[in-house]
């Protein structure tokens, strides 16, 4: 079955380190998204991509970057991790060109920055 | 600009009771509205969505929601709560216009507890 996976599921790192969170989907979806989930804030969009070589900033993009070299993967990089980036991160994907289409979510990565 | 407000961060019901989770939206374009559910330690999954047409939308697990344009609401209901419904529920609206039209704006979520 097609799916969307995230790795690692849990990560502990130290302030100042670079961290990369992986997201891989096998639906061949063109659209991919990264969100962070924090208590009291719901889900907030970090970055998104509508296709290979396309990346865009979301509402909370400072300190994060993404690159899209193929359809299946959208890795999220924290350039220099900060304690404020302790959160649960979700990747999602959807079909291109359909405003009504469903976003499918991965299981999440819990990141702790000490 | 679009936005979503979920009234009540926590809702508690008894098993067998009516579930009502409230969502109000604002949108400068015809809204596309979604309810997602998140079970503990899992990602979000779609419960139901409204795009166009029938304003009463039926979803999975016995949930339904009614789009009321005059009230700018999209409340989620279930006639009889089950213990397995305990989860966090998110209302979302599709961002309209421009290059970001595929994106969702989420409410802050409502955590549903079901008492035996």
Image (tube, helix red, strand yellow):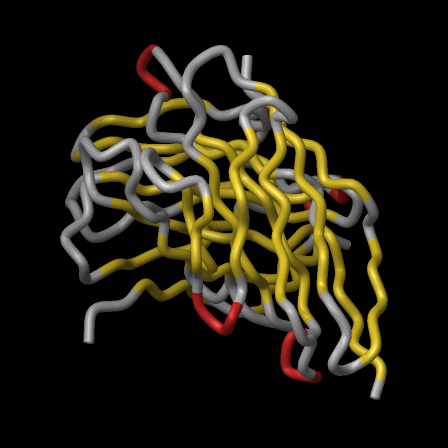
| Image quarter (top left, top right, bottom left or bottom right) of the N terminus of chain B | top right
Q: Is residue A86 visible?
A: no
In this rendering, the answer to whether B82 lies above or below B64 is below
Could you tell me which residue is drawn at 15 percent across and 44 percent down? A70
Residue B102, quarter of the rendered image? top left
- In the foreground, A14 or A51: A51
Give left or right: position of B105 versus A57: right
| Image quarter (top left, top right, bottom left or bottom right) of the C terminus of chain B | bottom right
Mark count: 0
Give left or right: position of B47 versus A49: right
Could you tell me which residue is drawn at 48 percent across and 66 percent down? A107
In this rendering, the answer to whether A104 lies above or below B100 is below
Could you tell me which residue is drawn at 66 percent across and 32 percent down? B24
Rendering coords of residue A35 (x, y %) = 52, 43
Residue B71, quarter of the rendered image? top right
Could you tell me which residue is drawn at 49 percent across and 25 percent down? A58
Rendering coords of residue B98 (x, y %) = 33, 11
In this rendering, the answer to whether B42 lies above or below A74 is below
Give left or right: position of B21 versus A58: right
Q: Is residue A33 visible?
A: yes
Residue found at the far bottom of this picture: B116
Rendering coords of residue B72 (x, y %) = 61, 26
Rendering coords of residue A82 (x, y %) = 71, 40
- In the foreground, A48 or B71: B71
- In the foreground, A43 or B12: B12
- In the foreground, A34 or A69: A34
């Amino acid at each position: 079955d097609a799916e969307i996976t995230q790795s690692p599921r849990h990560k502990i790192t130290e302030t100042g380190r670079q961290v990369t969170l992986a997201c891989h989907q096998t639906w061949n979806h063109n659209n991919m998204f990264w969100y962070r989930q924090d208590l009291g804030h719901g889900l907030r969009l970090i970055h998104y991509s509508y296709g290979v070589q396309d990346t865009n900033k979301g509402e909370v993009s400072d300190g994060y970057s993404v690159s899209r070299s193929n359809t299946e993967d959208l890795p999220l990089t924290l350039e220099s991790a900060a304690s404020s980036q302790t959160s649960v991160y979700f990747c999602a994907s959807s079909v291109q060109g359909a405003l009504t289409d469903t976003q499918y979510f991965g299981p999440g990565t819990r990141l702790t920055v000490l | 600009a679009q936005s979503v407000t979920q009234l009540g961060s926590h809702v508690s019901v008894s098993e067998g009771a009516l579930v009502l989770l409230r969502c109000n939206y604002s949108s400068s374009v015809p809204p596309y509205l979604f309810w997602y559910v998140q079970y503990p330690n899992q990602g979000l999954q779609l419960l139901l969505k409204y795009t166009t047409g029938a304003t009463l939308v039926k979803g999975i697990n016995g949930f339904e929601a009614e789009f009321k344009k005059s009230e700018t609401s999209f409340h989620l209901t279930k006639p009889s709560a089950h213990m397995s419904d305990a989860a966090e529920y998110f209302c979302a609206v599709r961002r309209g216009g421009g290059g970001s039209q595929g994106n969702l704006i989420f409410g802050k979520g409502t955590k549903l507890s079901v008492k035996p």
